[in-house]
Amino acid sequence: MSDLLDAVDDLTLPRNVKVQTDSGYTWASEDALLVQLTEAVASGLGSPSGGSAAPWARNLLNTDALHAAGMITSQIVDWCRLVKAPTTRNATIDLRSWYVAFVATQGESLDTFYTRKLRKWAGEIRGMLNPPKMIQMTSACPECRETFYPNEDGDPVPYPIVVQYWANSASVWEGAKASCRACGHEWQGQWELRGLRHSVDDMDAESVNL
Ligand SMILES: [Zn+2]
């Protein structure tokens, strides 16, 4: 599967998710991200038929969802026009039509721009629907070697590196990233995050050798 198709699927297909219940875990089907975004907008606007919307959708900051949904829908329509794909103003349907037409005309060789954009949207939607889990690393940053970073008041606090991930994603690496609050360096995705782990281990080994 190509990265581009993977990114399109992530936004447009339902997925199976592990759900915690009183008696352990069970699997449930979750709507596609773009569908969830659309539902969140509908429920945020006070639609009385919002029965399918989960509580998080009603608690959502609806202006953010509305802005994101509008921006994504019109961007996809623009992309469709570029490759002469039909549009319906339904972002889920339009994105899949765009993908078929795009691959037919351009192939997949130049797709990094679109793949990055789609991944960014998926991350933004997940962030709105389901805030990421955050963990702090207790090591120094391997880029800047800082062990402290300034908080909002400018006071130094320990553990500059924070890792965020989505517990509900198909893979824990999906959309995961780490960032250093001292120097701003970011590590995204599985390989960069594994690289970060190795750098931290190397650094710990170095300090033992000193
Ligand atoms: Zn740093």
Image (spheres, rainbow, N blue to C red):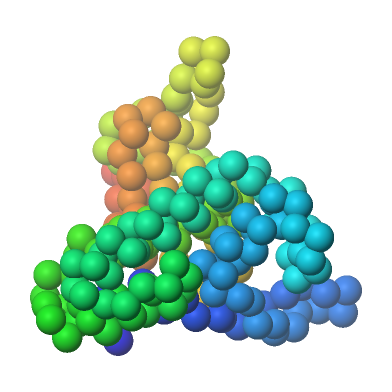
17 or 207: nearer the viewer? 17
177 or 9: nearer the viewer? 9
Residue 14 x %, y %: 56, 80
Residue 183 x %, y %: 32, 30
User: How many badges with numbers are in the image?
Assistant: 0
Q: Residue at image x 56%, y 81%?
A: 15
Residue 68 x %, y %: 48, 50
Q: Residue at image x 69%, y 51%?
A: 44
Q: Is residue 1 shown above or below 20? A: below
Residue 208 lies in quadrant? top left
**Quadrant in which the N terminus is drawn:** bottom left
172 or 93: nearer the viewer? 93
* Image position of 73 (left or right of 203): right
* Image position of 202 (left or right of 82): right
Return the residue found at the far right.
Answer: 22
* Image position of 187 (left or right of 15): left
Q: Residue at image x 27%, y 70%?
A: 80
Residue 9 x %, y %: 41, 78
On the question of residue 210 being in view, the answer is: no
On the question of residue 141 being in view, the answer is: yes
Q: Residue at image x 60%, y 83%?
A: 16
Q: Is residue 135 shown above or below 34? A: above
Q: Is residue 85 shown above or below 179? A: below
**Quadrant in which the C terminus is drawn:** top left
Residue 118 lies in quadrant? bottom left
Residue 168 lies in quadrant? bottom right
